[in-house]
């Protein structure tokens, strides 16, 4: 499915639609350059999960946790030097905690991508426009 977003609000809204479909154990891999809308899309996923927190990029902390009926674990792999670092911070433990894992800069950790991973590719088209391409949406359900 491919969507053109014409504002940050529309990008958030598309993330929210996906968030309403996600079940515990879902992994969402986000791809896109700086400014493509990954964090805005994640804020929408949080809203769709019923999380009311302000979502910010975990670039310096690697992961932000947002509690909820289904918690959200928001990862940013931008600063990782190797995929091994993700496993060192407990990736497997996060998968076992019954939340949704959203991973920005997924291209840096290809080993976490499985057949069940939902892939979202965001592309900067202009100051306010983004292309949002979602793949493997059938995996949004319970694992």
Image (cartoon, rainbow, N blue to C red):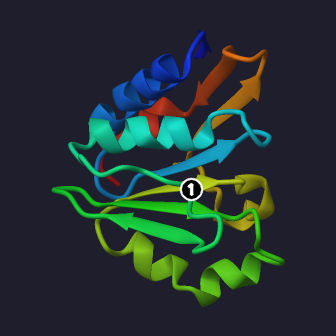
Vertically, is 52 above or below 97? above
Vertically, is 36 above or below 113? above
Q: Which residue is mark 1?
A: 57
Q: Residues within 10 Å of mark 1 (few under 14, many from 20)?
A: some
Q: Secondary structure at mark 1?
A: loop
Could you tell me which residue is drawn at 48 percent across and 43 percent down?
42
Give left or right: position of 85 versus 5. Answer: right
Image quarter where the C terminus lies is bottom left
In the current view of this chain or complex, which residue is farthest to the left?
69
Give left or right: position of 41 versus 85. Answer: left
Q: State the image coordinates of residue 60 (x, y, percent, origin top left).
A: 64, 72
Q: Quadrant of residue 12?
A: top left
Q: State the image coordinates of residue 115 (x, y, percent, origin top left).
A: 59, 49
Could you tell me which residue is drawn at 43 percent across and 82 percent down?
93
Q: Say which of 9 and 22 sits in front.
A: 9
Q: State the image coordinates of residue 62 (x, y, percent, origin top left).
A: 60, 72
Vertically, is 67 above or below 20? below
Give left or right: position of 68 versus 101. Answer: left
Question: How many numbered discs?
Answer: 1
In the current view of this chain or complex, which residue is farthest to the right?
81
Q: Say which of 63 and 27 sits in front.
A: 63
Image quarter where the N terminus lies is top right
Q: Quadrant of residue 122?
A: top right
In the current view of this chain or complex, which residue is farthest to the bottom?
88
Q: State the image coordinates of residue 29 (x, y, percent, origin top left).
A: 60, 48
Could you tell me which residue is drawn at 64 percent across and 23 percent down?
133
């Amino acid at each position: 499915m491919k969507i053109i977003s014409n504002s940050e609000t529309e990008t958030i809204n598309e993330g929210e639609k996906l968030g309403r479909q996600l079940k515990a154990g879902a992994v969402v891999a986000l791809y896109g350059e700086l400014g493509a809308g990954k964090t805005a899309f994640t804020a929408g996923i949080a809203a769709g999960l019923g999380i009311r927190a302000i979502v910010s990029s975990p670039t310096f902390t690697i992961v932000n946790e947002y509690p909820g009926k289904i918690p959200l674990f928001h990862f940013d792999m931008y600063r990782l030097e190797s995929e091994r670092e993700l496993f060192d911070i407990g990736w497997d433990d996060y998968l076992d905690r019954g939340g949704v894992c959203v991973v920005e800069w997924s291209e840096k950790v290809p080993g976490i991508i499985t057949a069940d991973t939902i892939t979202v590719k965001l592309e900067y088209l202009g100051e306010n426009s983004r292309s949002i391409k979602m793949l493997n949406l059938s995996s949004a359900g319970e694992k």
